[in-house]
Image (tube, rainbow, N blue to C red):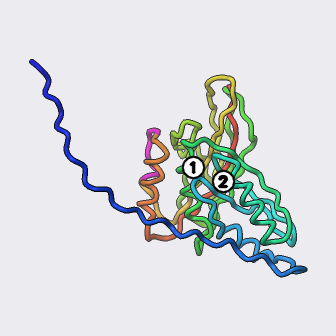
Amino acid sequence: AATAEPAIAALPPPVPVPVPAIEPEPAALPPGTVASVEQVTRFVQGYAGGECFYVTPLQLAVRDAKIEAFGASPSPFIAFDSAFQRAMGFEPEISLRQITRDQCPAVEFMARRAGQAGTRPPRLTLRADRIRSGQELQGVVESRGDPNLDVVLVDSEGLVHSLSPYLKRSGERADFSLKLEGSGQAEKAQLVVAVSSNRPLPALRSGTPMRADRYFRQLAEETRGGAPVNVAAGYFKLGG
């Protein structure tokens, strides 16, 4: 029997999409003025870098800023560096962790929570920033007061894997260690994301890998309007 052709419905007219206003660049400090740590912090946390852009201060002092950056392209961070120098009057030290487009939902989730009132980001440390296939990923994370702590790995293909089964907890501290297998010889970017909160989050309990866009959308829905969710990220490269 012949297969019936699917019916094609007429699409409704497109809905106009409002163009977001461009945020003005912060005004430069008066000549001879030394930026305070508070001014630098506000600049970093308030800078709008666009999609797949996240910056977080690692160390701030007078005329000294060490900043960790996560994104898929260097261009927005070159613009950030120029804007920082114009506004703050000195050059920051920026460490760019370049990720894949498939990992961007994780970075955008973190960026939306940067600078939220009451946040206490976990302290996440990885033992190495380069791992060969067959070696162990080792790290430690401190939740800093939150009773619930989970850790996930976002691989270069954008799949989110729960590391919670590998956590060995002791008070606010959790150590983890697991063997990783790479594919191919080229090194590929990997993200480790630690999430702490004052209540359990169902999205973090998934036992099967999930696409990053779906995973972090679900996590955002679960945390909308509630107490702050605290997030920290680690970065390493996995080679074959």
Q: Is residue 124 magenta?
A: no
**Mark on residue 49?**
none
Look at mark 2 in the image and give the residue it sits on: 141
- 231 or 25, which is in the foreground? 25
Circles 2 and 1, Cβ within 8 Å, touching? The answer is yes
Kindly state the secondary structure of the residue where label 2 is placed.
Answer: strand
96, 197: nearer the viewer? 96
Q: Where is residue 113 in the image (x, y as percent from the top left)?
A: 57, 64
Whole-percent x, y for residue 35 in the image: 82, 76
| Highlighted magenta segment, given as a residue range | 203-209
Report the side of 186 relative to 200 (left or right). Answer: right
> In this orientation, which residue lies closer to the viewer: 148 or 30?
30
The quarter of the picture where the C terminus appears is top right
- Residue on which the image places disc 1: 151
Residue ID at (75%, 43%): 127
Q: How many marks?
A: 2
Placement of 86 over or under 135, stated as above or below: below
Quadrant of the rendered image containing residue 101: top right
| Quadrant housing residue 207 | top left
Q: How crowded is mark 1: few (under 14 residues within 10 Å), some or many (20 or more)?
A: many
Q: What residue type is labelled 2?
A: Val
Dot 1 falls on a residue whose secondary structure is strand
Question: Which residue lies most toward the left here?
Answer: 1
Asked whether the viewer can see residue 147, the reply is no
Kind of residue at badge 1 = Val
Circle 2: is it few (<14), some (14-19), or many (20+) Cα within 10 Å?
A: many
Q: Residue at x 59, y 37 (%)?
A: 156
Q: Does the magenta stretch include residue 207?
A: yes
- Give the CA separation, mark 2 to mark 1: 9 Å
Q: First in sequence: mark 2 or mark 1?
A: 2
